[in-house]
Amino acid sequence: MKLFFRYFLMELKSAMEYKLSFLLVALGQFIVSFSAFLGAAFLLQRFTSIKGYSMEMIMLCTASVLLQYTLAECLGRGFDNFPSLVKSGKFDRILLRPQNTMLQVMGSRFEFTRIGRLIQAVILMAVGLSGANVAWSIGRIMTLIFMMIGGICLFIGIFIITAAFCFFTIEGLEIFNVFTNGAVEFGKYPIAVFGKRILQFCTYIIPYALIQYYPLLYLMGESNQTFLIGVPLLACLFLIPAVLIWQFGVKHYKSCGS
């Protein structure tokens, strides 16, 4: 963790060298992601609810997934840049260092400009929770914390799998954006609105529902099942197959740099 923290400070110092550029990019991130939420807001002005879910529920769905994804992208952006490391042969240098390869790749880049989206997610979360009149308790506070932990682990797991495929394809596969950017897009709504099959897929295959739909039911008082408090932490288990796929890729890696 000490090495990771040093990577973090180095990248932060580098980003702050161009403060105006940093602020403009962060502002752009805020505007782009906020315009996506406006589409759902305008829809709810016309129909007042979607399958019985209120505006507050929609806001919490949007805010929770956006917050989870933004934090994961800030910390795991190095995996998104991984194809360039493979193509240039720079990953060979990483293999020669006596440190964990995943830690080195993860620490190679942090996306601090995502603070614009982070601020927006926090605002939406605060407004949504205020409007929903949540009956706060220790359990509901823990639910919110576990949602963030589980969501960050889930998205970082997807980033790792995406990067691991580059060991075999060299180029990054755009199809994986369906599970990252696409998740943020359809995460604006409770996953149950997309039907039973999608809900099952998002529960047992790529567990988006564990970090959004199920814990929000308990948070908003629509379910009294206390086991839903810890459900988001199950999403952390997604890191296990992600790490195994990464290790398999490293084992079969063949340098392609010149």
Image (tube, helix red, strand yellow):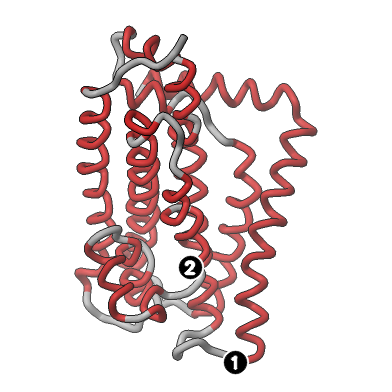
Q: Quadrant of residue 230?
A: bottom left
**CA gap, disc 1 and disc 2:** 18 Å
SS at mark 1 in the image: helix
SS at mark 2 in the image: helix
Mark 1 vs 2, N-terminal side? 1
Measuring from the top left, give residue 221's x and y in whole percent. Answer: 36, 81
The image quadrant where one finds the N terminus is top left
Looking at the rendered image, the disc whose residue lies closer to the viewer, 1 or 2, is 2
Q: Quadrant of residue 242?
A: top left
Residue drawn 54% across and 72% down? Answer: 59
Measuring from the top left, give residue 3's x and y in whole percent. Answer: 39, 18
State whether residue 237 is above or below residue 82. Answer: below
State whether residue 24 is above or below residue 104. Answer: below
Q: Is residue 194 left or right of residue 227?
A: right
Disc 2 marks which amino acid? Answer: Phe
Measuring from the top left, give residue 105's x and y in whole percent. Answer: 41, 25
Q: Is residue 149 left or right of residue 27?
A: left
Q: Which residue is more in the foreground, 61 or 175? A: 175
Q: Which residue is mark 2?
A: 186
